[in-house]
Amino acid sequence: MDDWLRRLGLLHLKDKPTELRAALEEAIAKNIEELQSIRDAAEARLRALERRDSLENSSDDVDD
């Protein structure tokens, strides 16, 4: 566990459970927000690609 705390920059809170818990909760919340932002951007990109493909396919149908 020390290794994980060191990676998170929280090793100094190892012997302070209340402060450690609060810091971990804050870090988790921040990571969740970042992951949601990444997911939202990926979904928007996917929708844009799907629209582009749909437009390309509809123009191919007109050419036929």
Image (cartoon, helix red, strand yellow):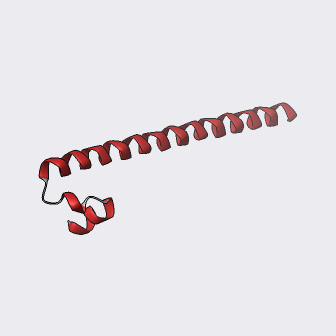
Task: Determine whether, in the image, residue 42 is placed left or right of residue 25.
Answer: right
In the rendering, at what x and y percent does residue 64 appear? Answer: 85, 35
Total residue callouts: 0
The single residue placed furthest to the front in the displayed view is: 12
> Which quadrant would residue 7 be assigned to in this image?
bottom left
The residue at 19%/57% (across/down) is 13
The residue at 25%/45% (across/down) is 25
The residue at 14%/47% (across/down) is 18
In the image, 39 versus 25, the foreground residue is: 25
For the N terminus, the quadrant is bottom left
Task: Determine whether, in the image, residue 55 is placed left or right of residue 63.
Answer: left
In the rendering, at what x and y percent does residue 37 appear? Answer: 47, 40
In the image, 38 versus 13, the foreground residue is: 13
In the rendering, at what x and y percent does residue 36 appear? Answer: 43, 40
The residue at 74%/33% (across/down) is 55
In the rendering, at what x and y percent does residue 49 appear? Answer: 65, 40
The single residue placed furthest to the bottom in the displayed view is: 3
